[in-house]
Image (cartoon, grey):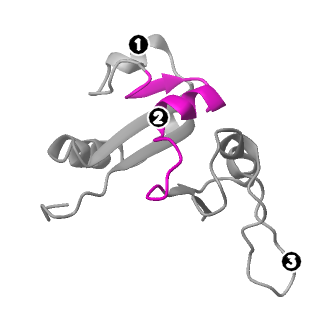
Amino acid sequence: MNDPSDTTKVTLILANKSVQDVIYKEELDALSGTHPSKLRVVHVLEEAPDEFWGMKGYQSPNPSTGQTGRITVESLRTLLPAPADNIKVLVCGKSGMVKAIAGPKIFEKGKAPQQGPLLGMLKELGYSEQHVFKV
């Protein structure tokens, strides 16, 4: 992140069910604080009491730093850059979340997992299979 010629920008959306599920928060927030033009960390918590957003350095819930609820097409629209040749979206997580966001990976016995077709929220937003990689 210290190479001035590197113009890569990363938005890391961390979706968790509850406060207890958040890992590496302090480390990631420290990195984004040190490199705000290169790394933005957004916490999305399905279950978060209002007072959570004021505790332990968590940002107030606004579309660019944190949200309560589930990831939606609208939240992705506000958080991600528009589809373009120089944009890549990596999706990882539990299979149900990956399926909802980008379509399911395909698992066949004896074969390496396949990307499968792009479906879900990212397709609805206009991304193509060249933009999205399911980890």
The answer to if 67 sits in the magenta stretch is yes
Q: Secondary structure at mark 3?
A: loop
- Note whether residue 19 is visible: no
In the picture as drawn, the residue positioned furthest to the top comes out as 50
Left or right position of 108 against 126: right
Structural crowding at the residue carrying mark 3, measured as other residues with C-alpha within 10 Å and reported as few (<14), some (14–19) or many (≥20): few
Residue type at mark 2: give it: Leu
In the displayed structure, 98 sits above or below 41; it is: below
Mark before the other along the chain sequence, 2 or 1: 1
Residue at 31% over, 47% down: 28
In the picture as drawn, the residue positioned furthest to the right comes out as 109
Q: Quadrant of the C terminus?
A: bottom right
- As measured in the structure, the alpha-carbon distance from the residue carrying label 2 to the one carrying label 3 is 33 Å
Mark before the other along the chain sequence, 2 or 3: 2
Residue matched to label 2: 79
- As measured in the structure, the alpha-carbon distance from the residue carrying label 1 to the one carrying label 3 is 45 Å
Q: Secondary structure at mark 2?
A: helix
Left or right position of 19 against 102: left
Range drawn in magenta: 63-87
In the displayed structure, 62 sits above or below 43; it is: above
Q: Residue 97's spot in the image, x, y percent?
A: 70, 46
Residue type at mark 3: give it: Glu
Q: Residue 62's spot in the image, x, y percent?
A: 41, 19
Residue matched to label 1: 51
In the picture as drawn, the residue positioned furthest to the front comes out as 85
Residue at 16% over, 64% down: 5
Seen from the viewer's position, the closer of residues 134 and 19 is 134
- As measured in the structure, the alpha-carbon distance from the residue carrying label 2 to the one carrying label 1 is 23 Å
Q: Quadrant of the N terminus?
A: bottom left
